[in-house]
Image (cartoon, grey):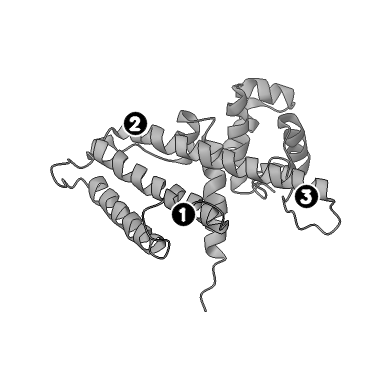
Amino acid sequence: MATNDFPRILTLLRKERGISQKQVSADLEISQALLSHYEKGIRECGLNFVIKAADYYGVSCDYLLGRSPHRSGAVLSIKDSGSTRKDNYETAVKTTEYNRRVTVNTLNMVFRILERIDNEALTKEISSYLSAALYCAFRMLHMANGKNPKNMFEVSPNMFETLLGIHMMLSLSMCRRLLAGETINGDKGVRKDALPILTNETLSRNYPNLAPSLFDLIKGIERDVREIKID
């Protein structure tokens, strides 16, 4: 009954704790070989093992099976009709903290990968792209309250979204060209041998504390993208 996400999440939870397969298999009362098969997706486990492993790692079965990005398995929504104002506030805080953690951890991971690639021009362009997205987010929050001072920004409020979109598209184009090895205005492109292998396994091994957030972010964004309907 294991899902495609189950082997990956089972492995990540163990690595997050820094414990061996030998210790986990002993604690869960199965053979190390069987645990290895579960983590590699070679064998499927039964419901009893899912429950036991979820209790062992302190997560929900839904999280372990990849059905929920939240370790508690809760669907964090402030629209529940039976919730109190206090419940709404606490849930909103949890949602904000979760999104902050996923975003910050993923940003850290991107910049650590950029450090390995070691290309100043690429780092500059990706930083510019990400900074523009943060600028846009802050400016929308700022503009929502008409009492906020208008002199904080020089770009016209009627034009900033359009200009920012163009700026971000240009940064993406520059990134693609640099990653393809192209030299731009004297800035050398990325060497092919400098590009790291980025798989679930290598990411989990090299960034054990950050990889789970990246995987959650990918899952969430792709879910949102799939739900877009264009009439």
Residue 42 appears in the rendering: no
Q: Residue at x 73, y 32 (%)?
A: 58
Label at residue 115: 2
Q: Are marks 3 and 1 in contact (CB under 8 Å)?
A: no
Q: Amino acid at mark 2?
A: Glu
Taking 189 as reference, is 163 left or right?
right
Q: Nearer the viewer, residue 206 or 132?
A: 132
Q: Position of residue 140 (x, y in %)?
A: 51, 56
Q: Amino acid at mark 1?
A: Lys
Mark 3 vs 1, N-terminal side: 3
2 or 3: mark nearer the eye: 3
Q: Position of residue 115 (x, y in %)?
A: 34, 31
Residue labelled with disc 1: 150
Report the label total: 3
Mark 2 vs 1, N-terminal side: 2
Determine the CA span between mark 2 and mark 3. Answer: 40 Å
Q: Amino acid at mark 3?
A: Asn
Residue labelled with disc 3: 88
Spot the residue most to the left: 186
Q: Residues within 10 Å of mark 3 (few under 14, many from 20)?
A: some
SS for callout 1: helix
SS for callout 2: helix
Q: Residue at x 36, y 49 (%)?
A: 129
Residue 66 appears in the rendering: yes
SS for callout 3: helix
Residue 191, placed above or below residue 176:
above
Q: Position of residue 80 (x, y in %)?
A: 80, 57
Q: Nearer the viewer, residue 55 or 226?
A: 226
Q: Residue at x 71, y 28 (%)?
A: 30
